[in-house]
Image (cartoon, rainbow, N blue to C red):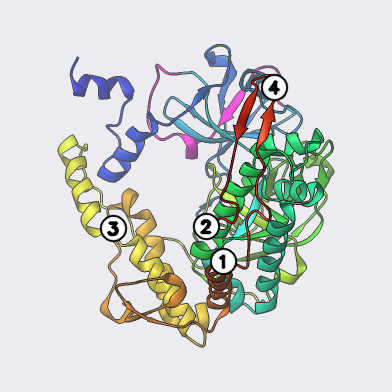
Amino acid sequence: MTADALRRRMGDFSSINIPGKMAARMGQCFSTTNIGSSRELSPHEWQHIADVERNGYVFSDGVGTISTNLLAEVAERLGYNKQTLSAIQIRVGGVKGVLCHDPTLQGRLICTRPSQEKFIAPNSRDLEICSRAQFLPCFLNRQIISLLSTLGVQDKVFENLQDNMLRAFRGASRDNGIALKMLRESGSLEIAQQMIEAGINVDREPFLRMLLKALKSQRLQDLQLKTRLLVPDGCLLMGVMDETGTLEYGECFLQIQRWHESNPTIVSGKVIVGKNPCLHPGDILQLSAIDTPALRHLVNVVVFPQKGRRPHPNETGGGDLDGDMYSIIWDKSLFPAESFPPMDYEGPPPKDLDRPVTIRDVTSFFCDFIQNDNLGPIANAHLAIADRSEQGAFDQRCIELARLHSMAVDFPKTGIPATLPGNLRVGAYPDFMEKKDKTSYESHKVIGKLFRDIKDLTRHGSLQLIDSPIEAAYDSMLGEFIYDDTTSDAML
């Protein structure tokens, strides 16, 4: 058995003439997956349907459908909650993307679209599951904070979010209610939530206290290094398309259910939607969440319309529906005072070899990618310029960097690198970026303020992760002490 023979068994890649794209398609075969069905899909259980296309855009890019029966089989086999499972990210041979629940489909059936077909693999018909749609908490990062601040959100809003997190940290070590609320909002440590719900006190049980201690240490580090702010009135969800054609352009459907809740909640009213990475002011969309009876079977996904001039996922960071996750926020204090037109994410045409790709082409491209990948430097330059400029992310240099960043993201698929020109390189960085080997200055914008607040707390020890020593717990059956912690005031 040779390497070439193994590659031939993976599938037919002969129609791909772009080295980076071929490497990505071959890598698709090595995705970590679980088999989601009891047997392979037979020909009559796998249908092919058309994409929804308009104005040169594919509104259904990366998403297909799955019947109720087959989705229930996946849930039972993999231990998912049948009531909240509405979409799965899959691999079936050379097909990848998302399958969304369609209650009109009968029996055991999936429907995939051309936008999901990446290469030909006729000998593989197992339904492989990469991930599932589920409720995840929403966190802001520095890119989103920079954009929202540029769009008019006041500094005090972000400061309040950080203060609320710190207040929860302090109270979680003493109060079961505060600890449970913090765990539920952040979607963390299900075992700790179950222990508290069972009546175990956070101020007495050493293992539970250590779990909370580790979580708070991680959250503090995230605040200092990434300005990762929890938004309780928000979530992170997988995107899908409205197969019923009910939603209009500018609308979305949102029904959520956290793991500890017994019933879903429909979110109605104005929301903002974004996707990481996001560097352009137009990446923050303002949509109307509409209660749509025809879509109430969908839980813990954000449903975008198939109507309009351009798909909403494409408007925010050039996203699609093959598994991309979208932040949705209905906290009114974070609504921008103004909006900005979305960026056109249509990049340059890929570098086509006009012949089948060889492994030598792939290895050559890999070396080229290592040498010319500028994704990190472009993102850092954008953050630094947006911080120092009075215009923030509206600065024309930031707009150009957003375009270059999009090119850099697509570099593995197109083979065309994004070059960072000299006029967009940064001479000095804000203190919150902690570039020890570079010239630095004290940032006077909100990210700098939040960063120094956390630094001051950790430097002076005024934020204790554990407020009192963890007492030794005696196990009468073992007849010995099972835990002893003499270091109670651990800091970053």
**Could you say which disc has been placed on residue 286 in the image?**
none
Is the magenta region chiefly helix, strand or loop? loop
Rendering quarter of residue 204:
top right
**Could you say which disc has been placed on residue 72 in the image?**
4
Q: As shown in the figure, which amino acid type bears the numbered disc 2?
A: Asn
Residues at marks 4 and 2, CA–CA distance in whole angstroms: 31 Å
Q: Is residue 240 above or below residue 377?
A: above
Q: Residues within 10 Å of mark 4 (few under 14, many from 20)?
A: many
At mark 1, the secondary structure is: helix
Rendering coords of residue 379 (x, y %):
40, 66
Q: Residue at x 27, y 52 (%)?
A: 415
What residue is shown with label 3? 373
Q: Is residue 117 magenta?
A: yes
The reply to whether callout 2 and callout 1 are in contact (CB within 8 Å) is yes
Of all residues, the one furthest to the front in this rendering is 479
Q: Residues within 10 Å of mark 2 (few under 14, many from 20)?
A: some
Q: As shown in the figure, which amino acid type bears the numbered disc 1?
A: Ile
For the record, the magenta segment spans 105-124
Residues at marks 3 and 1, CA–CA distance in whole angstroms: 23 Å
Tag 2 or tag 3, which sits nearer the N-term? 2
Residues at marks 2 and 1, CA–CA distance in whole angstroms: 8 Å
At mark 3, the secondary structure is: loop
Answer yes or no: is residue 271 visible: yes
**Which is nearer the eye, 230 or 442?**
442
Q: Residues within 10 Å of mark 1 (few under 14, many from 20)?
A: many
From the viewer's perspective, is the residue at label 4 or at label 1 nearer? Answer: 1
Q: Residue at x 47, y 85 (%)?
A: 389
Rendering quarter of residue 349:
bottom left
